[in-house]
Amino acid sequence: MDRGFGAWLKQARKEAGKTQRTVAEEVGIDFTYVSKIENEAPHLSTTGRPSEATIRRLAEVVGVDPDEAVWRAGKLPAGFVDTVEALSWDDFRHVWSAAAARRTSPTPLDDKEHQG
């Protein structure tokens, strides 16, 4: 998993007050799979990575932004390439510059880690 998806999901799950088992039941997957995702089991890097639909459902169940979850899982959201290809060069440069500036900015969930 890229971008710390497993640890981020685990933190969000705990903040939602849910167990791996309850999340798994609500998503419709085995609780051991939730554990493997959260612990970023080595085999998930090549096989068995969750689909975009599963990632989005996990995010909904624990109450976080599904788009951020897809990004943290190292996937491109469906339709992303079409959207980028439709941009003019000037619009693309603007988006790329904004994204580059944001790389060092924490997300709202990251900010919670630093709060008492």
Image (spheres, grey):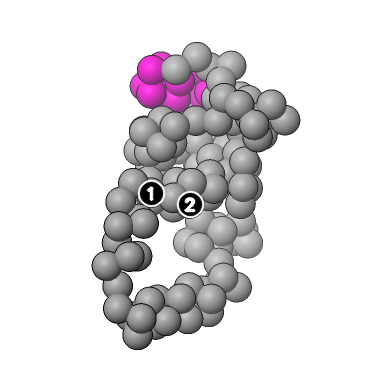
Q: Specify the quadrant of the image occupied by residue 33.
A: top right
Q: What secondary structure prevails in the magenta region?
A: helix
Give the mark nearer the N terminus: 1 vs 2.
2
Q: In which quadrant of the rendered image does the C terminus lie? A: bottom right
Q: Nearer the viewer, residue 17 or 38?
A: 38
Q: Residue at x 50, y 14 (%)?
A: 30
Q: Residue at x 45, y 46 (%)?
A: 70
Q: Position of residue 76 (x, y in %)?
A: 44, 50
Q: Are marks 1 and 2 in contact (CB under 8 Å)?
A: yes
Disc number at residue 77? 1
In this rendering, the answer to whether 48 lies above or below 108 is above
Residue found at x 56% / y 70%: 103
60 and 93: which is toward the camera = 93
Viewer-side label of 1, 2: 1
Residue range (magenta): 19-28
Q: Is residue 98 visible?
A: no
Image location (x, y in percent) of residue 91: 33, 80
Residue 27 lies in the magenta stretch: yes
Residue 105's place in the image compared with 48, above or below, is: below
**To which quarter of the image does residue 41 belong?**
top right
- Answer few, some or many: residues within 10 Å of disc 1's Cα (few below 14, many 20 plus, some between 14 and 19): some
Q: Is residue 87 above or below residue 32?
A: below
Q: Nearer the viewer, residue 1 or 66?
A: 1
Can you see residue 5?
A: yes
Q: At numbered mark 1, what does the secondary structure look like: helix, strand or loop?
A: loop
Q: Residue furthest bottom?
A: 90
| Residue annotated with mark 2 | 71
Let me know if residue 82 is in the magenta part.
no
Q: Residue 88: name its quadrant.
A: bottom left
